[in-house]
Amino acid sequence: MSALISKISTARRIVFESTPVKLKFPLQDVTVSQVTETNSVNNPVLEDGFVAISQNQFQLKVSGLATYFATNGKEIQVAPEPGADPAHVNLYLQGSVFGAILHQRKILPLHGSSFSWQGKGICICGETLAGKSSLTTSFCLEGGGLLADDVTPIRMLDGQPIIIPRSGHVKLWKDSMEALGLDTVNLETTGSGEPKYHQPLPQPGDKNTPLTHIIVLETGAVNHMIHETLSGVAAFTALRNQIYRWEYLPAMPETEAAYLQQLINISKTIPITKVTRPENIAIKETKNYFRSIIK
């Protein structure tokens, strides 16, 4: 499948024109409609058979599942195929399509999970299987508050990056649930096959949590955990690499230009730490290491 295709309050004004699917979307001010056929992108800048993108229009076709169309950061059309798994339909709606809407709004999305901890707003970035959601959960189970899972939207307020909260649950694999001592009974899942489980977590009362520390987590050929504080070009590049669905940006020059200044500001003012962990290490041990470096 194309590299462009990879994943919360209920959407408003859901219009059903065929067998209804309960559509869920993280932003309440976006109109989400179920249709039999979506609109197409006018004069796409990027098109590869899976996606078609221009500055303010986006279409995603997932064979055997659904076609999605998003426009102007405000409206989404979803055309599920007959028999499509509703959980999988929502997975793309809350992932790739969510990323497109944020790009259209010029709201910077980082590929990371975030939480509040002792008055700080922490975002853990990294690739799939890095351990972002598991670590976030471990902090939230000990007094932290969940802000976002997997995709963390950042808006600028008076020059300060603010984390936009997006959900009250994280998605965890079964082995992570077991390692954290959590029960999978009666939890919603991401669909059939080997699903993740939607684990509810406490959220902070303050909805304007400043971003105070970004940690880029990766696995490597190391015997113990190591970290380094990034600065200058290294900090900027690391942050740029953590933009969720960055591959859409060549077709969205206005958004790419808007992000440039945001990335410069954040990389200069917010600590960015790169952490490398061994492939096999306990969640608790990783969390204890993070506690020692969180600023």
Image (spheres, grey):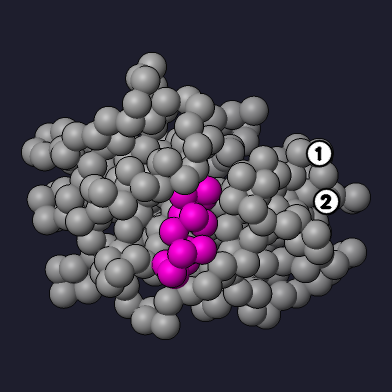
Q: Residue 100's x, y, as percent?
A: 48, 53
What kind of residue is marked 2? Asp
Q: Which residue is mark 2?
A: 85
Question: Splitting the image into 4 quarters, where does residue 179 fall?
Answer: top right
Q: In which quadrant will I find the C terminus? A: bottom left
Question: Splitting the image into 4 quarters, where does residue 164 fall?
Answer: bottom left
Q: Is residue 27 above or below residue 225?
A: below
Mark 1 secondary-structure assignment: loop
Query: Does residue 74 show up?
Result: no
- Region of the chain picked out in magenta, as a range: 133-146
| Residue located 24% across and 48% down the image | 293
Please state which of residues 255 and 263 is positioned toward the viewer in this rendering: 263
What kind of residue is marked 1? Gly
The answer to which of marks 1 and 2 sits earlier in the sequence is 2
Q: Is residue 241 above or below residue 107?
A: above
Q: Which residue is mark 1?
A: 193
Residue 137 falls within the magenta-colored stretch:
yes
